[in-house]
Amino acid sequence: MSHRYDLIIFGATGFTGIRVVELLLKSDENINFAIAGRSEIKLKNVLDDISKRTGKDIRNIPIVVADSDNAESLAEMAKCAKVIINTVGPYRLYGEAVVKAAVENGANHVDISGEPAFLESMQMKYGEEAKKKGVYIVGACGWDSIPCDLGFNFLKRNFNGQLNHAETFVQLNSGVAGYSFNAGTYQTLILGIANMANDGLSKIRRAIMPEKIPRSLYRPPKRGKIWYNEKLDGWCLPFLGSDKSIVSRSEYFDYIFDNEPPVSEVRCDL
């Protein structure tokens, strides 16, 4: 299949989509890309605004009109792209249709989801078809969860001995104005908490990771959900994002495919 664009940024009128466009413009790579979203007018406004702010006229960048609620428009978008960078969240509401269109039409799909249920269910539903088509579904490519996954990988490979368990911490420090995050992130957080009891994650995980992997007899001490960390001089609680989900799957597949001893206990805290 011939794809017109190297990349299409879907959701280019949103907070993250605009940031992706700006970063691409700073890249030295010669990347042929288009922007996509529901409103052609808003997409044109984004190009106009970035052109004015940067002094670089990008108003000739191609525009693709596509809507998460319109399967036909998503299919047409996927046919045009080698890679779709999907920045439209919450992904539990709007993500699956884009993944489905990408896989069915031979496009790679990249997202910035931090939603374990979405990420793991996409592997369960579309992983085998993607493998047959020779395309990739690459999730959690934002703040969740690249630093954590690479950090565990680096530690395991540079540890003097076999790493039994490891723990990561995310520390948030506010500026003068206090804490803030965009509406999409807030909505994702609320939906994640509201659906924790009925996400069906246990069933999904049995489907995508059916084999048992060895566990060490040496386990870290148990503790409460909220606990004080003397080294950080602060209170901690389990991180509700995708970090543990991502690292646990990496450990599983490193063992299954490369026979690497897995880290028995993965903890990610905030």
Image (cartoon, rainbow, N blue to C red):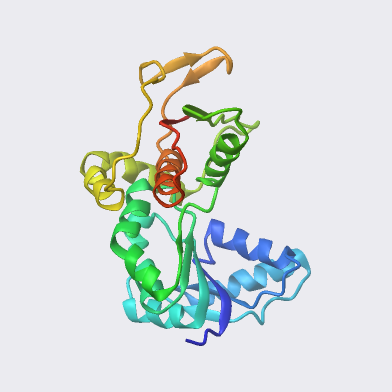
Asked if residue 67 lies left or right of residue 108, the reply is left
In this rendering, is residue 83 above or below 172? below
Q: Residue shown at 49%/66% (left/top)? A: 11
Q: Residue shown at 38%/69% (left/top)? A: 130
Residue placed most toward the observer, 97 or 174: 97
Q: Residue shown at 39%/15% (left/top)? A: 221
x, y percent for residue 158: 63, 35
x, y percent for residue 226: 40, 19
Give the quadrant of residue 88. bottom left
Asked if residue 224 lies left or right of residue 60, the reply is left
In the rendered image, is residue 67 in sight?
no
In this rendering, is residue 5 above or below 225? below
Q: Residue shown at 66%/82% (left/top)? A: 60
Give the quadrant of residue 34. bottom right
Asked if residue 232 lies left or right of residue 104, the reply is right
Asked if residue 26 lies left or right of residue 70, the reply is right
x, y percent for residue 33: 61, 76
Q: Give the mark count.
A: 0
Farthest residue, direction right: 55
In this rendering, is residue 266 above or below 89? above
x, y percent for residue 246: 44, 45
In the rendered image, is residue 247 in sight?
yes
Residue placed most toward the observer, 134 or 59: 134
